[in-house]
Image (cartoon, grey):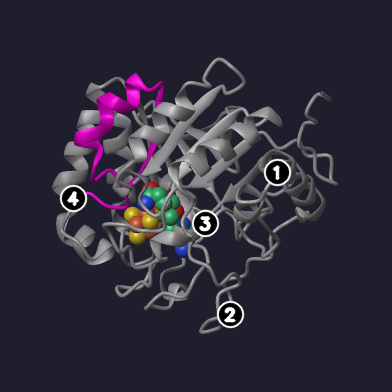
Amino acid sequence: MTTPQPLIDQFQRRITYLRLSVTDRCDLRCAYCMPERQQFLPRAEVLSLEEMHRMALGFIARGITKIRLTGGEPLVRRDMMDLVRAIGRKLGDGLEELTLTTNGTQLAQHSEALFEAGVRRINVSLDTLDRATFARLARRDSLPQVLEGIAAAKAAGLKVKINAVALKDINQAELPDLIAWAHGQGFDLTLIEVMPVGEVDEDRFDHYLPLSAVRDDLEQRWTLEPVDYRTGGPARYVRVAETGGRLGLITPLTNNFCEGCNRIRVTATGQLYACLGGNEQVDLREALRSDDPAARLDAALDTAMRIKPERHHFEIDRAGAAPAVSRHMSTTGG
Ligand code: SAM
Ligand code: SF4
């Protein structure tokens, strides 16, 4: 048997990081992410737990060392913890890190089991600490549940990073308080610019807030010290001298963050997207359901390496225009 080849794209980027969306369903309806009446996928189209596990093993054999489970909301999938445990068995045996991105609503129930399965760090999305703003933005009054979940994660020993989308007129004025709260809890916080992916009910351009403006504002009150810390992802980090905490800034629209891209994404139906901001895709479900799944999966991954684009093509300055990418973030997993 030949040794499986590492995943290297045509721009010599080595792909070691898989973001796997385990469901497109969610218990919240964040206004920038999906419309209130989101059409979810028929369950039959979604990969089974066994298929996701087999696929994960195929990726690990090709040199994927980090897997992030996401969604939709990963923790609303009923058999999710079985998948976490199954993939977690590969930790120390090819896989270096298993992590997830969650809205936090289900963390009170699952944090201990996540830790037991080998998860050590999680990202929790939280845009506001104001209950009314949360209820308006997520269209569900779930802030207390999320805060309880975050506390449970911390108590279980999980290292929490907070991700917040910066939104003009919604959480803009509150961002310093949110950052100070996170740092006070011992959590890093990363700010994200809103991206034009998927049709939603509102025009995101109305709330687009460039992080350069946020940074200028924060510099009026705090000292932001550059730090070298990099996670292999698109975030650039600074340390806030006054809080002692780390602040990440992800600026997909104002910067080109593609050069060092080491990741690919797979949807809950097994569609591999080579780029969050592009439509290049490969069908892994067809490969997984074929007569020779291992060989077909390998061939599909080789195709993915050939089509991964050099950079994304997002633009948000087209007010009222259709999104650059029509699928929702909840499909590709953000
Ligand atoms: N439900 C989980 C959560 O909210 O963390 C995981 C999936 S969610 C799609 C992943 C991340 O994408 C969240 O941090 C969310 O804020 C972000 N996101 C969703 N739509 C976005 C958009 N249009 N622009 C920027 N970030 C977005
Ligand atoms: Fe759900 Fe996450 Fe999208 Fe919010 S951002 S609607 S929590 S998938």
Q: Disc 4 residue type?
A: Leu
- Which one is in front in this view, the residue at disc 3 or the one at disc 2? 3
Answer with the quarter of the image where residue 309 lies. bottom right
> Residue 122: within the magenta?
yes
Q: Disc 1 residue type?
A: Asp
Residue under circle 1? 292
Upstream in the sequence, badge 4 or badge 2? 4
Q: Residue at x 52, y 45 (%)?
A: 20
Upstream in the sequence, badge 1 or badge 3? 3
Which disc is residue 318 wearing? Answer: 2
Q: Residues within 10 Å of mark 3 (few under 14, many from 20)?
A: many
SS at mark 4 in the image: helix
Distance (Cα) linking label 1 and label 3: 19 Å
Q: Residue at x 47, y 61 (%)?
A: 45
Q: Disc 2 residue type?
A: Arg
Residue under circle 4? 143
